Image (spheres, rainbow, N blue to C red):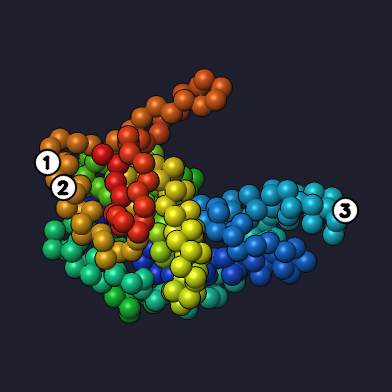
Amino acid sequence: MKLKAIIFDWAGTVVDFGSLCPAKAIQTAFATKQIEITAQDIHRFMGIRKREHVQVLLSLPNVTAQWQKAYGCEPGAQDVQVLYEESERRMIETVANFATLTPGLKEALAAVQRRGLRIGSTTGYISAMMERLVPAAKKNGFNPEFWVASDQVRVGRPWPWMIYKNMEYLEICPPSAVIKIGDTVADVEEANNAGVWSVAVVESSSLIGKTQKELKALARREHSLLIKGAYTKLYEAGAHFIIRNLTELDEVLEQIDERMMNGQMPPRFIQRRQDGAESAQFWCKTVPPSPQRQPVSSRR
């Protein structure tokens, strides 16, 4: 058996290097309530449904403390809704401006098409955002066969339903014949929960959260530590493969096809928590490689 389909994430993976559109919109929305929140905190939870994202951010101790000082109470459900609606409005207005393709995407698409893979996609964005982003991305050269927004399923990432909707539309089965590529922990967890191959991309990811120009301008040590930190988070989340950018995707596709020809499925394991309970996760007996020495890391 070989791979049959690939499912791309959008912001931070195929467009919007650094996943800056949602981060800027959320940060500005919080500022309207006199609440300071760092881009780093916002990027920590990128990839999930945007309303849930706002709710998680409001629950951060430093954010809750600011809210209590400003308004004399903890933020409630109505506050979540107001901030979400402001963030949503700003994302809808600006998302098409962030449709520039990430480096290596065109070469990656050529490799995907050469292998005859079907192309789907999932996103943490809602439909109204995608209706503006999709046409803009198409003009730039990215036009997947199918996309699913987070409001088109009952629950978004890390639940697997968006991946399954892609598989249903593309008529692809089993899950082990599918690869999901994204830039966030939520993308990795979505893939793991669906039972498909998980590939994580680093340089354009929200975990880095910088433009290409900003990333290149970093001092060597700072750059190295930032990349290594993102590798570690994606590895610990359970990514089967971690790549620097999309120019390395073809090598991953080749490795997965070889493993599938040898009968290997996406690896899983039982993770034992400190309380002794068990929870299903993905696993491999390898350590995260040095990003300087080995750009493509994998779980065997």
**Residue appearing at x 50%, y 21% in the figure:** 277
**Residue 176 vertical placement versus 113 (above, below):** above
Q: CA distance from mark 1 to mark 2?
A: 6 Å
Q: Residue under label 1, please give it.
A: 261
Q: Residue under label 2, please give it.
A: 257
> Is residue 139 at all visible to an observer of this figure?
yes
Q: Position of residue 295 (x, y in %)?
A: 31, 57
**Residue 212 vertical placement versus 262 (above, below):** below
Q: Amino acid at mark 1?
A: Met
Crowdedness of circle 3 by 10 Å Cα count: few (<14), some, many (20+)? few
Nearer the observer, 29 or 270: 270
Q: Residue under label 3, please give it.
A: 72
Crowdedness of circle 2 by 10 Å Cα count: few (<14), some, many (20+)? some
Q: Position of residue 76 (x, y in %)?
A: 75, 49
Q: CA distance from mark 1 to mark 3?
A: 62 Å
Name the outermost residue toward the top. 276
| Earlier sequence position, callout 1 versus callout 3 | 3
Q: Amino acid at mark 2?
A: Asp
Q: CA distance from mark 3 to mark 2?
A: 58 Å
The reply to whether dot 1 and dot 2 touch (C-beta < 8 Å) is: yes
